[in-house]
């Protein structure tokens, strides 16, 4: 599944690789990869494959799940579609509480003790999704874990997940994308080592030297 999803994301440019001309993230980090999983929603064939994979991953790894909760905003649609496939209720968690109305941060009905799976589109350092997990735990939810579409596999993210005691299952990851890209001729075989160097230490820009 990892390889198939990786190829699909590359095909629709939801994951875009450019080792020779890196992108600049909001943090200032130079990156050889740019990820926009919102493009999945506008590619029906890939969308069907991804949403079914999310549903299957929930069933296989979190069979006791009672509610799906999407991250705001990118995880909302994926949680809704997977929830429809699984016939499970869904909601989503805002990045912060509303400043009007009831001031909700968690949208949708959530009972204390309910078993929740968080649906996320992308995990890099893990900070935002862990914040969502903590908000759900504070609300009394039993968070079983996360299903993400793509993860970078960065050490900082892995360590944060472990410290927060949260499990993540990703449909595909940076390694699978790099290998799939080399196989299809998207990047050169020699670029794989550079991509892995970036993943292992994004702050070290020596990977940019071919």
Image (spheres, rainbow, N blue to C red):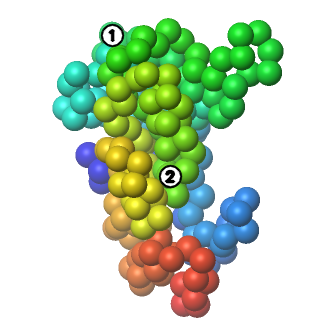
Q: Count the numbered circles shown.
A: 2
Residue 28 relative to residue 46: left or right: right
Q: Residues within 10 Å of mark 1 (few under 14, many from 20)?
A: few
* Residue at image point 50% right, 9% down: 109
Query: Is any atom of residue 114 visible in this view?
Result: yes
Q: Residues within 10 Å of mark 2 (few under 14, many from 20)?
A: some
Q: Which residue is mark 2?
A: 126
Element class at badge 2? loop
Q: Nearer the viewer, residue 183 or 74?
A: 74
The reply to whether dot 2 and dot 1 touch (C-beta < 8 Å) is no
* Residue at image point 40% right, 61% down: 159
Q: Residue 166 location in percent, x, y? A: 36, 44
Q: Is the residue 60 above or below the residue 10 in the image?
A: above
Q: Residue 32 location in percent, x, y? A: 58, 70
Q: Residue 180 location in percent, x, y? A: 36, 62
* Residue at image point 58% right, 16% down: 107
Q: Residue 91 location in percent, x, y? A: 51, 17
Residue 18 relative to residue 161: left or right: right
Judge depth for marks 2 and 1 and give the one in front: 2
Residue 116 relative to residue 28: left or right: left
Q: Which residue is mark 1?
A: 87
Name which quarter of the figure residue 90 lies in. top left
**CA distance for labels 2 and 1:** 28 Å
Name which quarter of the figure residue 52 lies in. top left
Residue furthest to the right: 100
* Residue at image point 46% right, 13% down: 110
Element class at badge 1? loop
Mark 2 vs mark 1: which is more N-terminal? 1
């Amino acid at each position: 599944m990892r390889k198939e999803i990786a190829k699909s994301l590359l095909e629709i440019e939801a994951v875009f690789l450019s080792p020779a001309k890196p992108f600049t993230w909001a943090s200032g980090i130079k990156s050889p990869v740019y990820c926009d999983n919102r493009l999945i929603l506008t590619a029906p064939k890939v969308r069907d494959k991804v949403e079914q994979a999310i549903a299957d991953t929930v069933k296989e790894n979190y069979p006791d799940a009672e509610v799906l909760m999407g991250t705001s905003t990118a995880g909302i649609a994926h949680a809704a579609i997977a929830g429809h496939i699984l016939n499970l209720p869904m909601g989503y968690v805002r990045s912060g509480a509303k400043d009007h109305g009831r001031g909700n941060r968690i949208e949708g009905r959530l009972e204390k003790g309910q078993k929740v799976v968080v649906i996320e589109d992308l995990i890099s350092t893990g900070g935002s999704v862990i914040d969502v997990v903590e908000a759900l735990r504070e609300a009394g939810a039993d968070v079983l874990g996360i299903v993400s579409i793509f993860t970078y596999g960065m050490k900082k993210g892995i360590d944060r997940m472990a410290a927060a005691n949260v499990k993540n299952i990703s449909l595909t990851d940076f390694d699978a994308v790099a290998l799939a890209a080399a196989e299809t001729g998207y990047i050169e075989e020699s670029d794989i080592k550079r991509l892995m160097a970036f993943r292992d230490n994004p702050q070290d820009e020596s990977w940019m030297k071919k």
